[in-house]
Image (cartoon, grey):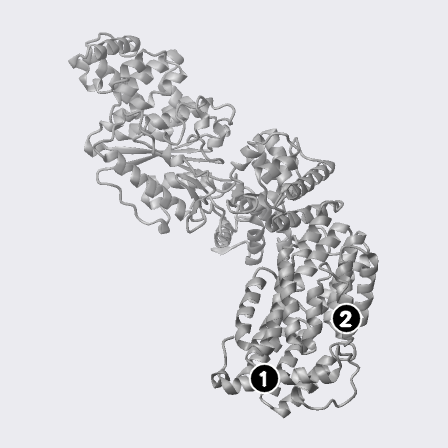
Amino acid sequence: MQRDLRAVFGSNDRSFQAAEAFTDRESQWQTVISALTEHLHRVAHPDFDVQDLETGRRNILVFHGVGGIGKTTLSRKLESALLDAENRPTRWGEVVWPRGMRILPVRIDLARSAGTNFEQIVLTIRAALADIGRQLPAFDVALRRYWEHQHPGEPLEEYLRRGGLAGRFGRAMPQQMQSALADVAQALLLPGTVGTAVGQVTGSLVRALRERRQTVRALAGCTRLADLLEAEPGLDTLSFYPHLLSWELARLPAGKKVTPVILLDTFEDVGDRTHRDMERLIQRVVWLMPNAFFVITGRSRLQWAEAALQGQLDYTGPSAWPVLDYPATGAPAGRTATGACVEGRQVLVGDFSPEDCDDYLAHRLTHDEVPLINGEIRQVITDRSHGLPLYLDLSVMRFLEIRRTGRTPQPADFDHDFPALIARTLSDLTAQERHVLRSVSLLDSFDIELATRAAGLTHQAPAMRLTERPFIRESPFGLWPFHLHGLIRSTIRGADDHTDDRWSPHDWQRAAERAFTALGGQWNDDTDQGRMLLVGCLRQGLAVARDFRLDLGWLTDAAWIYVSDSIWEPLAPPAHPETDGTLDTAAEALVALLSALARRQQEHREHTAARLTAITDTGLLPAELHEMCLYYLAKAQRDLGHTEASRTGMQLVAAGGGRLAPNARRGLAHLSRLAGDFPTALEAAGHLGWEGRHHRVIGDVWWVQGDMNRGTQAFHAARLEGEEHGKTGEAAMSQAMRAFTLAFTDPEGADAEIDLAEHLLAHVDLRAATLDVRIAVLLRDAGTVGIENRAHDLAVEISTSGLIFAQAKLELALAFHHAVRDDQPAIASSIDRLKELTRQGYYAYYIDIAHFMAAVPLRSPSTTQWIDGPEATRTRWRALVTTRRQLLHLAPDMQRPRRI
C-alpha cells in the first residue's frame, strides 16, 4: 500500500495509517482495454502500414476533466496496471492480449512543475524501448546526429543519468545506440571510431540509401530515412524522428513484438490555445507512431478533429482524427454505468458517486483498519464535495489540521469552501474566461449568448472557449445547455478568493445586475413568449434578485404572465445560505408569493392563507403585486369558508382597479352565489365580460338552479372563450364544470366531456377543477353499486386539501346517489353532513337541494334566493332524480359499477 506522505508528515500522531486511496475507476479501465484491444487488432492486420501518412489515426484515447477530478491518479494507475497485473485492482479483472503481443506502458508527466520539454519526451520513449533489448538503428543514427549537433560536447549518457531516465529505464539505451552506429559504420566500411564519425556515418548512409546499395538494404525499407538524415537536425526535425521508431517497431520479429502505450499526463500544461508550438510537436509524435497507443489526460478535450485549426497544427479535422470527433448536433454524449461521459475516444472523467466518496474517505486515514473519519463527517464531506476528489483530499488535510489543535473534528467543521479550488479552476483560463466564469457562477444554467451578456462582453469567443472546459457540464436538451460544476460554482461564489483578479463586492453586485438584465432581455426578446423560457427566466431571475437585493424590474410582468396560465410550476430557488427565512426585500417577498401560489395546489388552504397573510403584512411588494397577494389570499379564505374576510379582500382589489379587478368582481359574484343570492350573482355576471370570466359565473349560477341545460351551455361558452384567448387554465376549469353538470343529466354523454376535461387538466395544475372531474365521475355512475366506497376514498383525499366547498360538493353528489336509490336513511345522513360542511352564507343552499332531490320538505325556512323561486327549482332537481331512476330501469346493466 502506497503511503500518503502529506498526511504522514502532517501530524506527530503515528497511531493511524495514512494511505493513498484509489477509488475504483473500472469504467475508465474498461474503456482503455476496449480501445487498446481494437488498436492491437488493427495493427496486426496485414494491410496496416506504419509508413502510410494519409490514413486517419485511431491510436489515441483522451481522458479529460476538471482539475482535481483524479486524472493524474488514473494515469499512474493505468501505467501500473498495464505494467504488472499484480498492481491491477481485483474488480478490473484479467486481460488477455492477442498472442505474441507485449504491452509496454510509458508515462510522461507534462506538468510545468515537472519541467518536461520535447527532447525529454522523445528520449523517454526511446529509453523505455531499450527494454526490448534490440537496436533501433534508423532512429538511433538520426538521434545521435541530432544530439551531436544540438549538444556538442555533452555526452548523452550523462544527460540521461542527470535527467533520471537512466535510473528509470536502465543504461541500455546508450549502449544500444552506440552498437547501432558501429554496425552501420561497419556496413558502410567506414574507418575510425564511432564517436568521431557520426557526421561521416550519416552522410555515407544517405548516399548509400540514395544509391540503393545492398550494404544498407536493412534500412532501405524506411523510405524517409534519407530525408530525415539530410534535414537540419533541429527541434522541428526531431519531432519527425518518431516515424523512425514506429518503423523499427513494425519490423520487430514476431516473438519480440511490443506495443508502447504512451500516457501523456497534464496535457493542459503543454501550452494554451493561442500558442500551440509544443502541442504541434507532440501531435506529430502521435501521428507518426500509428502502431503506438496514446492515452492523454488533461483538463480539456483535444481539438485536433476541428478543421478550423488547420494551419495551427499539422493534422486536423474529423477525417484525420475520426475517434476524436464529437457530435455538434446537440445529441447527448453516451454515459458509462458509473457516469463517465464518452464522446468517441474523448472521455469526461466523471465525479465520484456518493459511495465512492465514502469509500475514499474511509480508507485514507485508518486506525487498526477502522476509518479515522467517522461516518457523520464523511457524509457531510461527501454531500459538499459534489464527487470532486480534490475536495475530498483537501477535507482530509483539514481533518488532520483540526486534530493538530487538540480538538476532535466535528461535522460542522466541514461545511467549508476551499479557496484552493478557485486557484486550480482559474489557473489555465484567460482573463476574459475567468471574467465569464465568475459571471455565470450567478446562474443555474446558461447558453453562450446569456453568458456573454451576463459578462458584459461584446463578443462571444470567451464564453465559447469556456464551454469547452471540463467544469462546464452540458445538457443538450435543456433550456440553457450549459451549467457550472456544482462544487466549483459554490466555491467561486462562497470561498475567500485570493487570486490577483478577484472581484470586490461591488464587482459582484454589478455582475448580478448584468445577469439579471440579461435574463430579462432573453425573455423579452422571445417573440413566442414560451412558457418554458418564462419559467426558466423567473427561476433564475428571482434567485439573483433575491441574493443581491435588486429591484424587481421585469420580474413583475413575468410574474403576472406566470400566474395567468394557471400551470403553477415550482419556482422557489434554493434557500440562500445567509438568510434565516425572514422576508427583507421585495424579491424575497415575490419568491415567497409565487411559491405559495404554486404550492397551494398540493397543500391545505390553511397553509396557503397563512403564507399569503405573512407576505401581505410585510408591505414589501409594490402595489400591483400586493394586489395579487391580496386577491389569492381572498380566494384561499373563500375556499376555507371565511366569507367575510374573503369579501373584504375582494372589495379592496376590485376598488383598486388593477389587473385583478375583474377577477375580484367575479369573486364578489361568487360570494353572492355562495350566500344564496342568485339574482345578485346573475346580475353581476352580466357586467363581468371576458376578463371577469362571465360565462363560467353564469354557469355556476344555473346548475345549482337545477337548470343543467343552461349550465352546460354557459360552461361550453366559457371553455371556447378560454381557448380563444389561449388560457388553458380557464378552458380546463370550464370544461371540468361542464362535465360535472352534464353528469347529472346524461351519463353516457358525460364520458366524452370527462375525457376532454382530463386532457385539458393534464397541462395545468388546478386541484379544485381536478376534484370537480372526479366528482363528475361519481355523478355519472350515481344509482349504481359501489359509489359509497369510491366516494369515501375521494373524501379522504379532499380532506387534505382544505377545500371545504369540494367536500360539500362531493356530499351533494352522494345525496343525489341516495335519492336515486331512494335510500332515506342515507339521504338523512347526507343532509346532516351538509349542515356540518355549510353554514349561513356558505353553500347553505346545498341543504335545500338535497331536500329537493329527496322530495322531502325543508326542516326550517331557507334564506336562499332562487332565480325563479323554490318550487320551480325543487321540480327541476326532483326531475333529475326521477329521470336517472327511469334510465337505470331501462338499462339494468348500469346497476354494475362503471369505469372510474
- Among numbered discs 1 and 2, the one appearing first in the sequence: 2
**Which quadrant of the view contains residue 309?**
top left
Q: Which residue is mark 1?
A: 883
Disc 1 versus disc 2: nearer the observer = 1
Alpha carbon distance from label 1 to label 2: 29 Å
Q: Are marks 1 and 2 in contact (CB under 8 Å)?
A: no
Q: Is residue 37 above or below residue 729?
A: above
Amino acid at dot 1? Thr
Q: Residue furthest left?
A: 214
Q: Which residue is mark 2?
A: 681
Amino acid at dot 2? Ala
Q: Which residue: 63% across, 49% down?
A: 534
Answer with left or right where residue 862 lies relative to residue 812.
Answer: right
Closer to the camera in the image, 311 or 648: 648
Query: Which secondary structure, mark 1?
Result: helix
Callout 1: few (<14), some (14-19), or many (20+) C-alpha neighbours within 10 Å?
some
Callout 2: few (<14), some (14-19), or many (20+) C-alpha neighbours within 10 Å?
many
Q: Is residue 480 above or below residue 784?
A: above
**Which quadrant of the view contains residue 523?**
top right
**Which quadrant of the view contains residue 694?**
bottom right
